[in-house]
Image (cartoon, helix red, strand yellow):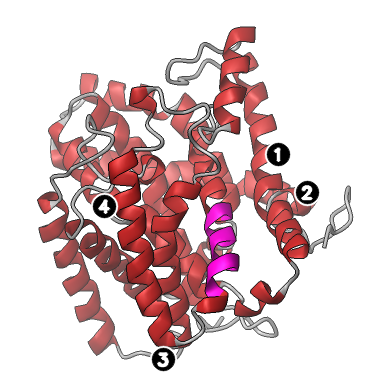
Amino acid sequence: MSMETESGKGRIWVIDVARFYAMALVFYGHFIERFMLLKNPAGFAQYKFIYSFHMVVFFVLAGYVVRESDIEFRFGKYLKHRFISRLLPFIFFTAIFMVLPVFFPGEFYGIKLPSVEGYIKGLANTVFGLPSFCIPSWFILMLFSVELVHYGAFRFLKSNSKILIGAVAFYVVGYWLNLKLDIFNPLKGRVIGWNYLFIHEAITMYAFYLMGVYLRRKRFLVDKVSLKILVPGVIITFLIVLFTYNLNTGPFNLSIYKAVVIICASHGNFFWFPISAVAGSFLILFLAKITPSQKTIVWMGQNTLILMCLNGIFYHYINGRVAKWVLDTLSGSGLTVFWVGCLMTVASLGVCIPLIYVFDKFVPQLVGKPKLSGPWLKNFI
């Protein structure tokens, strides 16, 4: 199987592998977050390292694969496509996760479920961008808004030089807008009535989306690249992240975390944040290019939307309990946290495989693949 393209579809395999790595970091990062919340120093260090770049990677990859011709659609058609491929899966998984608390006790951050009051508050939060029943699904909402920004802005950014200038401009405007206005901040009660599909942070993330567009135009990693370039690339970008992530000491809007948290537009330092984020994005791309295109990895990379939502199972129901057990039973050292985190990530992704298969087979139209037909529903597009 070629890593470069999927026969007949022009799919770039390295992007699917990169998505898999980024998704693994989401699973690992959300597990390690629980150690951080339990005041474990090793957990905090690993959490801050991963969060310095891992969500930015998804926006870079989304920009890399976007079809530039899509902005030629009428707005109604464009909006329909994005609704069916983004918001419909969000609604579908939200409905599923609303049922789970009836059968399983979970952690929902200030919301008591199952209860009428809890469901009302959870639905209100979800409408205003804090998907209380499945927190990890917030990314889908922000991606939807980034794509709306793209529809409006990219028609004025057709040349490569304009793309680069636009990326810088959107970053500067988005960064200062969110720093000064602190629009969405659960710590300050700024949820209901404040956040609308993360459009405020979509401005910042569009800068990295444009970076992906630019890399695709330059055919970055599309063709064969020597290991003499890739291996040093991995080492150098890793070291850049390693030696810069902790230099980002703020200001953070979500001050208690003292780390980058994209959902709250909490970026930290104006200079160190993009340096770590861009270096981390290249790190994942270089790693993906080195990795053989193993079928399961590629397949899981093609199903990151499903995985992002399924991560809610572990985020709300499992991670906290396991992290507490580890700290109560084992050492809280960096190595222990790392290896347990790796085992937990592999196990969690493994559990998701049959679930992905079921959703893919029976309702692909509801999980981000509207062009496919299934046994229950016809294609939507």
In magenta, the rendered stretch is 144-154
Q: Residue at x 47, y 87 (%)?
A: 159
Q: Is residue 354 above or below residue 97?
A: below
Amino acid marked by disc 3: Lys
Give the quarter of the image for residue 197: top right
Alpha carbons under labels 4 and 3: distance apart: 29 Å
Estimate the x, y position of residue 201 in percent, counting from the top left.
42, 49
Earlier-in-chain disc, 1 versus 2:
1
Q: Is residue 152 magenta?
A: yes
Can residue 291 be seen here? The reply is no
Using the numbered discs, state the Cα–Cα distance from disc 1 to disc 3 in whole angstroms.
Answer: 39 Å
Q: Give the residue at mark 4.
A: 52
Mark in front: 4 vs 3 = 4
What residue does disc 3 label? 224
Instruction: State the residue position of label 2.
Output: 363
Residue 328 point in image, percent of width and height:
22, 19
